[in-house]
């Protein structure tokens, strides 16, 4: 560590940087170097795990690269899995600014997708796509936001723990979906996969030209940027961060903590609901049990790994999308069970969280400490 | 054999309470101790699953189910120790570490458990209390696994120890105010580390019950969130081990509701009956909490109650 | 390699198509010489149930010279399965894909079949229709409900209480047809008996399956059977409760030495062996392959100690009829709400899709689909 310190020290004064800007840059560098270091460390530990099993880590990481990022197809495969993760990660990140840990985004996704498909039902064949598509989108957003807003309201008004409430509500969301999809709203089209009536090809969301990935990806990136702006450039974001830091102080300042909590949760739920919309409108074409595919839960990892920073979420989602995309190739070529990728994901998650403890520990990143 | 559907459902729920509650009981007791010390470990779901796998594997390989139970407890303790150790580091979020260990633990369990899905391992046997009744359904309901009683005794012991022993005092003090504990010369980190380790041990035993007694089989769908539900149980048990027993029994009974109603022909809306444990937990949490006063019995240091 | 006309021809085609549709860089062909087959499972390959049955039987394909088999497990019924198919095609050079889960068919497999016309796709169970679906797609299925019908006959003659229990995962057509066939078998030999159904809501929920088995035993059922991914828990719980049981998917006879009657088993190996032979001869696989007892695609487990002599005799007779492809479903047939689903005098051929598009529970089944 000392070597790098000196070299940076030497470069520190050059280039006419003000001390403040330098400190900001260094903090940004810290936020990049530490997570990357953590990923490298987890890869190293995982290599030992593979070696102990008699498998080659070189092959593993080579396949990981090829399956996730090594070709245009692999990128497509990765990005198509990335899109829903951005939305569900935002569902964790936004309330996290207030100190809330929401782990039931999957429920909002499921109900969002379901609401989108249901709203489309009476419109099919009567309304043009430019009516059906926005209606579906809004319905998904609304359903998702109400679902998580309930969690926020329960937290604020009744003091119910949001982590557990959101998880319980996920199970309830799935029960609601299955009750209708296997019952009153079941379409006779596919006797072996209970689903709502297909929305039809004209109401489906297309692909981003030249990329082979649906528009959800672009929406996700835009939404991540919007969340960043909201959190850093608006009064709302500032108030949320204050409340997240210290509720009592926030109350003393006269901040409407309850409203902040409910609105943040509503925004979070809307984001997960949009993920559900794209699952229905860009992929499944109907609502069914496949909506609960685990994107909501992987989104938790993505958000924590991105340290709840909306701008960091898309790249981290690409990392996890790539892991999922390459998982299949690894299974097929190395004969490793599917759980291998889960082990690696868990390991990365654990190591990343441990690395949280390193922030501010390295003198090189911290000019303030120096003075 | 009674044909009264009400009686059948009642018996099924009674029997379900005894059969299904044990894993909830062990996980929630473990979590109760951990939370009393001021930490929350959401990773017990992963611990439960890994415990179930290791118990079944060891029982199969060694031929002794009780050795399997011991293995499950030890592996659970390792996961607990890992959580306790990591959370000691500054700035590390215990909830997040829990989620991470949940993923990691179940991932490892699935990875190593592949070859134990098909074999039939020796299972734990029950103690038969059927002589207490002449009703045939009740006779079956009263075949009770020894672990259930171990859980009851553990709950009593924990309840007593938390109130009356030096150990209990130290744990509670650490959980209520780390600063005070430090002032008294207690090593807060050590207390929490031990509490989490013991909590993990208990959760591992809960897993062993799943794979070695009821339903008595290992596969990847075995737990379906029971470890997480148990954490919720602790909150509405108000960190009271005796209340944990009641909550676990209630939860077991709720889980039996869906199948029991369908068995007597009430099946419309079974999706919701099957979700009864989750709906019930949420309802009780809503009904029993209040933002106005802090939760009675809640450890002051616990992140989720702040 | 000259034997593989199919693969050679399609390889050339795909090379050409690859230039057009494939992305600019980085296409690997792992197995350029022979035929690569991709098999996709929805759960773990060793689940002691549905997926394992396929995985074990599909080994027949690996024995064909020149054939490479690549397999992927735990692939959810989302975009993931589309990408898995595409990955098998693009990275492994697969020319034939077997997708073994219900929900893989529409839209996932249909989309991929349209995108890769040079690759053949086959789906276990799905209803491929000539006028609706791409010609390089198809489906194959074994009529397990025939074996459940035999189960029903044996069970109907082995019950004392006249109450039987069926634990089912989801109310989808392939499950409903098994429940109905079981009930029809039961009531053919025991017209007043009823079959109590419990839906657990998902394919693998061991605790709820055990609870369901106990609840059924408590309510007086003395024979239990099921259609869930892994019937181990149900059969073992039945045995523990001292009630009889019928198996599903594979043989569970050894799990219930006292109460096992018989079980409905797939013989996927016959199906995959048939496919393997066609491939070895360089022929195209059929788009729509179906069969039951007549083609040796299903079987019943050898009778266990729970089967009465009378039951064995009647079941053996039913098997003989099914082997001769004699129809076993005929009107009048009502669902359990009293609505007529088949008029009196109508006889349903064993290959009629009527038996594959079940969306009701027949009379004699107690329970509801929602």
Image (spheres, coloured by chain):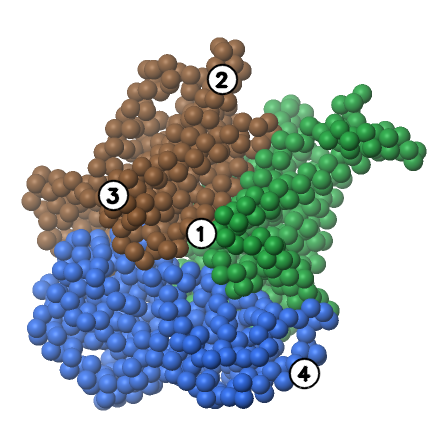
Which class describes the residues within 10 Å of circle 1: few (<14), some (14-19), or many (20+)? some
Q: Which residue is mark 1?
A: B111
Do labels 1 and 3 touch, CB within 8 Å?
no
Q: Which residue is mark 3?
A: B64
Q: Which residue is mark 4?
A: C16
- The letter of the blue chain is C
| Chain at tag 2 | B
Q: Is C233 on the left-hand or right-hand side of B227?
A: left
- As helix, strand or loop, the secondary structure at mark 2 comes to loop
Q: Are marks 1 and 3 on the same chain?
A: yes
Distance between the alpha carbons at the discs numbered 1 and 3: 23 Å
Residue drawn at the location 23% of the way across and 84% of the way down: C322
Mark 2, mark 1: which one is toward the viewer? 1
Numbered circle sitting on residue B187: 2
| Rendered shade, chain B | brown
Distance between the alpha carbons at the discs numbered 2 and 1: 37 Å
From this viewpoint, is residue B199 visible? Answer: yes
Q: Is B275 on the left-hand or right-hand side of B212?
A: right
Instruction: Indicate the position of residue A267 as horizontal and vertical percent values.
Output: 62, 46
Mark 1, mark 3: which one is toward the viewer? 3
- The letter of the green chain is A
């Amino acid at each position: 560590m000392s070597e790098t310190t000196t070299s940076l020290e030497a470069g520190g004064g050059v280039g006419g940087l003000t001390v403040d800007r330098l400190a900001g840059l260094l903090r940004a560098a810290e936020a990049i170097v530490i997570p990357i270091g953590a990923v490298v460390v987890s890869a190293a530990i995982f290599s030992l795990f593979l070696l102990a099993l008699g498998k080659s880590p070189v092959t593993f990481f080579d396949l990981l690269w090829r399956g996730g990022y090594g070709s245009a197809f692999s990128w497509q495969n990765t990005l198509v899995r990335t899109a829903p993760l951005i939305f569900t990660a935002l569902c964790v990140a936004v309330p996290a600014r207030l100190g809330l840990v929401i782990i039931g985004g999957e429920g909002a996704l499921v109900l969002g997708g379901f609401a989108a498909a249901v709203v489309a039902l009476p419109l099919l064949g009567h309304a043009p796509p430019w009516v059906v598509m926005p209606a579906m989108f809004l319905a998904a957003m609304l359903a998702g936001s109400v679902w998580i807003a309930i969690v926020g309201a329960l937290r604020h008004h009744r003091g119910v723990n949001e982590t557990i409430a959101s998880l319980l509500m996920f199970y309830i969301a799935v029960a609601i979906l299955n009750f209708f999809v296997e019952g009153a709203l079941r379409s006779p089209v596919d006797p072996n996969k209970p689903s709502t009536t297909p929305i039809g090809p004209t109401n489906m969301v297309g692909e981003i030209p030249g990329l082979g990935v649906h528009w959800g990806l672009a929406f996700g990136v835009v939404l991540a940027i919007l969340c960043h702006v909201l959190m850093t450039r608006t009064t709302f974001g500032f108030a949320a961060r204050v409340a997240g830091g210290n509720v009592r102080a926030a109350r003393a300042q006269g901040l409407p903590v309850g409203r902040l909590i409910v609105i943040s949760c509503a925004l979070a739920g809307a984001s997960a609901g949009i993920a559900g919309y794209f699952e229905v409108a860009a992929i499944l074409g109907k609502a069914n049990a496949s909506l609960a595919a685990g994107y909501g839960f992987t989104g938790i990892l993505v958000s924590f790994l991105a340290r709840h920073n909306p701008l960091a979420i898309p790249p981290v989602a690409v990392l996890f999308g790539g892991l999922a995309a390459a998982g299949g190739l690894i299974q097929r070529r190395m004969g490793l069970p599917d759980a291998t990728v889960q082990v690696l994901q868990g390991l990365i998650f654990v190591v990343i969280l441990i690395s949280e403890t390193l922030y501010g520990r390295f003198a090189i990143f911290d000019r303030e400490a120096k003075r | 054999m009674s044909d009264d559907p009400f009686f059948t459902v009642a018996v099924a729920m009674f029997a379900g309470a005894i059969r299904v509650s044990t894993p909830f009981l062990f996980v929630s007791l473990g979590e109760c101790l951990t939370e009393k010390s001021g930490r929350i470990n959401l990773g017990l779901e992963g611990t439960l699953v890994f415990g179930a796998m290791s118990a079944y594997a060891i029982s199969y390989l060694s031929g002794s189910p009780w050795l399997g139970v011991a293995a499950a407890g030890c592996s659970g303790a390792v996961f607990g120790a890992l959580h306790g150790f990591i959370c000691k580091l500054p700035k590390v979020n215990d909830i997040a570490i829990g989620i991470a260990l949940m993923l990691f633990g179940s991932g490892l369990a699935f990875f190593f458990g592949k070859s134990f899905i098909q074999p039939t391992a020796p299972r734990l046997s029950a103690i038969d209390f059927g002589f207490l009744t002449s009703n045939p359904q009740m006779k079956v309901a009263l075949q009770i696994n020894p672990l259930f009683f171990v859980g009851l005794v553990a709950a009593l012991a924990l309840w007593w120890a938390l109130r009356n022993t030096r150990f209990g005092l130290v744990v509670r003090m650490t959980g209520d105010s780390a600063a005070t504990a430090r002032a008294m010369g207690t090593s807060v980190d050590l207390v929490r580390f031990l509490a989490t380790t013991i909590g993990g041990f208990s959760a591992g035993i809960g897993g062993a019950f799943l794979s070695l007694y009821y339903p008595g089989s290992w596969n990847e769908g075995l737990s379906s969130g029971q470890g997480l539900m148990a954490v919720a149980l602790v909150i509405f048990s108000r960190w009271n081990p005796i209340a944990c027993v009641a909550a676990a029994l209630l939860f077991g009974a709720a889980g039996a509701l869906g199948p029991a109603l369908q068995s007597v022909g009430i099946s419309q809306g079974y999706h919701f009956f099957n979700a009864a444990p989750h709906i019930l937990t949420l309802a009780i949490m809503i009904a029993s909490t209040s933002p106005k006063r802090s939760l009675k019995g809640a450890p002051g240091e616990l992140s989720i109650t702040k | 390699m000259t034997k593989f006309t199919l693969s050679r021809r399609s390889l050339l085609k795909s090379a050409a198509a690859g230039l057009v549709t494939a992305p600019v860089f980085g296409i690997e062909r792992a197995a350029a010489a022979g035929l690569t087959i991709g098999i996709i499972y929805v759960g773990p390959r060793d689940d002691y149930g549905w997926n394992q049955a396929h995985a074990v039987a599909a080994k027949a394909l690996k024995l064909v010279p020149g054939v490479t088999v690549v397999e992927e497990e735990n692939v959810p019924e989302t975009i993931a399965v589309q990408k898995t198919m595409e990955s098998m095609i693009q990275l492994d050079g697969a020319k034939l894909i077997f997708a073994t889960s219900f929900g893989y068919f529409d839209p996932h497999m249909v989309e991929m079949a349209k995108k890769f016309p040079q690759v053949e796709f086959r789906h276990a169970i799905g209803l491929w229709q000539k006028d609706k679906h791409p010609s390089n797609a198809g489906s194959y299925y074994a009529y397990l409900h025939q074996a459940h019908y035999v189960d029903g006959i044996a069970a109907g003659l082995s019950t004392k209480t006249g109450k039987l229990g069926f634990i089912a995962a989801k109310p989808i057509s392939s499950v409903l047809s098994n429940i109905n066939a079981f009930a029809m078998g039961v009531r053919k030999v025991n017209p007043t008996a009823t079959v109590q159904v419990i839906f657990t809501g998902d394919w693998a929920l061991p605790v709820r399956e055990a609870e369901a088995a106990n609840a059924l035993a408590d309510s007086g059922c003395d024979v239990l059977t099921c259609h869930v991914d892994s019937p181990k828990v149900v059969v073992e719980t039945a045995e523990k409760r001292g009630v009889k049981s019928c198996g599903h998917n594979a043989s569970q006879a050894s799990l219930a030495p006292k109460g096992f009657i018989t079980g409905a088993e797939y013989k996927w190996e016959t199906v995959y062996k048939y496919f393997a032979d066609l491939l070895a001869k360089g022929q195209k696989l059929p788009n729509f392959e179906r069969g039951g007892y007549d083609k040796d695609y299903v079987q019943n487990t050898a009778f266990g100690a729970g089967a009465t002599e009378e039951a064995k005799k009647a079941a053996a007779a039913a098997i003989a009829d099914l082997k001769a492809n004699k129809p076993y479903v005929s009107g009048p047939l009502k669902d359990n709400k009293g609505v007529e689903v088949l008029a009196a005098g109508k006889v349903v051929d064993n290959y009629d899709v009527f038996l594959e598009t079940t969306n009701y529970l027949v009379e004699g089944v107690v329970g509801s689909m929602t």
